[in-house]
Amino acid sequence: MDVFGLDIGGSGIKGAPVNVESGELLGERVRMPTPEAATPDEVVTATIEVVSRSGWDGPVGCGFPGVVKEGVIHTAANVADEFIGFDLQTRLQKELGTPVRIVNDADAAGLAEMRWGAGRGVEGTVLMLTIGTGIVTALFIEGKLVPNTKLGHIEIHGKEAELWTADRKSGKGRGPRVPSVGTGSPPDTLRNA
């Protein structure tokens, strides 16, 4: 089965057709920046544009940077607060005229890792961590997803971890600079965070 895979992120909206049996991309990835205000209407419009640019007409699977339950958004860290309580799944289904499923973005990435990547065949507990615009996590216990874990929202120095990190990346925050992978150990302030 082929599906158009979408990733709505804090800085970009990306998508490509994907074979869900193999995980293989079936076409070029389309990307556009997330609108500055990142309101539901703006993000829906940009998301439709990404799908349209690809010429796709079929089912859509979408990762979203927040807690998602049955297509409804319950948190909004890297997008407008107006997303809280917004039924993104129903809205996109209506606009696209095709089946759409929305899940937490980290859960989507984690499911892919468990099926085709580093988590394949791993027993016990698996934690996937991705650092991008935010810090996202997916937790699996005995191969079963614990949905919406959102460990990036733990508190460090009185601020959510992903906001603390994002502020530091923009030069506005007080968090430590973390060295690139392979350049040595993290600063003492991070070890003691």
Image (cartoon, helix red, strand yellow):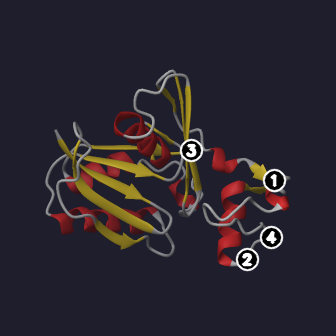
**Residue drawn at x 41%, y 43% as measured from the top left:** 108
Q: Position of residue 137 (x, y in %)?
A: 56, 44
Q: Amino acid at mark 1?
A: Arg
**Disc 1 or disc 3, which is closer to the eye?**
1
**Which residue is labeled 2 in the image?**
172
**Which residue is labeled 1 in the image?**
191
What is the spatial separation of the Cα atoms under label 1 and label 4, in whole angstroms? 15 Å
**Disc 1 or disc 4, which is closer to the eye?**
1
**Residue drawn at x 81%, y 53% as measured from the top left:** 191
Q: Position of residue 190 (x, y in %)?
A: 79, 58
Answer with mark 1 or mark 3, whichever residue precedes in sequence. 3
Answer with mark 2 or mark 1, whichever residue precedes in sequence. 2
**Which residue is labeled 3 in the image?**
137
**Which residue is labeled 4 in the image?**
174
Q: Amino acid at mark 4?
A: Arg
- Asked whether disc 3 touches disc 4, contact meaning CB atoms under 8 Å apart, the reply is no
Q: Position of residue 192 (x, y in %)?
A: 86, 53
Q: Would you call the spot at circle 1 few (<14 residues within 10 Å), some (14-19), or many (20 or more)?
A: few
Which image quarter is the N terminus in? top left
13 w.r.t. 7: above or below: below
